Image (spheres, rainbow, N blue to C red):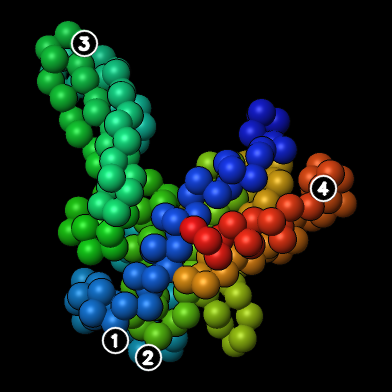
Amino acid sequence: MFINSLNRSSSFYAHSFSFYKNISEQYNDHSILECVKQLLPDTVLNSYMADRSLKPLLHWFKNDLMKWMSNKIQCLSCKILMRVQILEGDSLNSRTSEIYTCDKCKSTIIFPRYAKILKIAETRVGRCSEWSILFGAILNSLSIQTRIVHDYLDHCWNESLINKKWIHIDSTLNYPISFNHPHYYEQNWGKEYEYILAFSAKSIEDVTKNYTEKWQIIHNRRKNDKIDLLKKMYLKA
Ligand SMILES: [Zn+2]
């Protein structure tokens, strides 16, 4: 199912680097983190402070704060699937905009894919990228060092530094799968990875090994390992 996406060129990865670098830089911006922290209800914050469990935080984020944006939208009046057109955005504010149009009544829905954490905090809607961008900011606002991870197939999530180890956290999944279940995607979604990259403002890390039980297969799939090249590209992004 993912075969077509494998053995991609370096430029395929590089295309997203300035975006992830910019998000990672926003994670270091205290004024942004202070704003994001205001989203937290006292009950959720107090519960986290009491026992340092991320469970209430994950539950609140998924069930109360965020809305999921499907990429298959039905026109509410005509009950037919709307046609989607994707427009390039200016990368600083929005990556792309998705314009959904009903071919029958011509009504439209616009979904801008924002690249600014505070804009996502305001709209609170999106898919795995918006969710992980904002959830990562919320964790950083609680002084839990957190980064974005992308599998370069179709999913992204977070990792947080807990007891000096980077731990898998996916705010789009239900607890307890959302916390420290790195093999979940390979076991349940049949993922066939090439590179899974974790981002910080200054560098990328190849974290693929942590998410697979089939490392040798991935290693063979890579043919020539290009992680050093990707790291150089990230520096220049
Ligand atoms: Zn319609």
What's under tag 2, amino acid-wise?
Ala
Measure the C-alpha gap from mark 4 to mark 2: 48 Å
The type of residue carrying mark 3 is: Asp
Q: Is residue 32 above or below residue 109?
A: below
- Lower position in the chain sequence, tag 4 or tag 2: 2
> How far apart are the two marked residues, 1 and 3, measured between alpha carbons?
49 Å
The residue beneath circle 1 is: 46
Q: Residues within 10 Å of mark 1 (few under 14, many from 20)?
A: few
Residue 131 versus residue 71 in the image, above or below: below
- Asked whether the beta carbons under mark 2 and mark 1 sit within 8 Å of each other, the answer is yes
Q: CA distance from mark 2 to mark 1?
A: 6 Å
Q: Which residue is mark 2?
A: 50
How far is disc 1 from disc 4 in space, using C-alphas? Answer: 49 Å
Task: Say whether residue 124 is visible.
Answer: no
In the rendered image, which residue does mark 3 sit on? 103
Give the quadrant of residue 180: bottom right
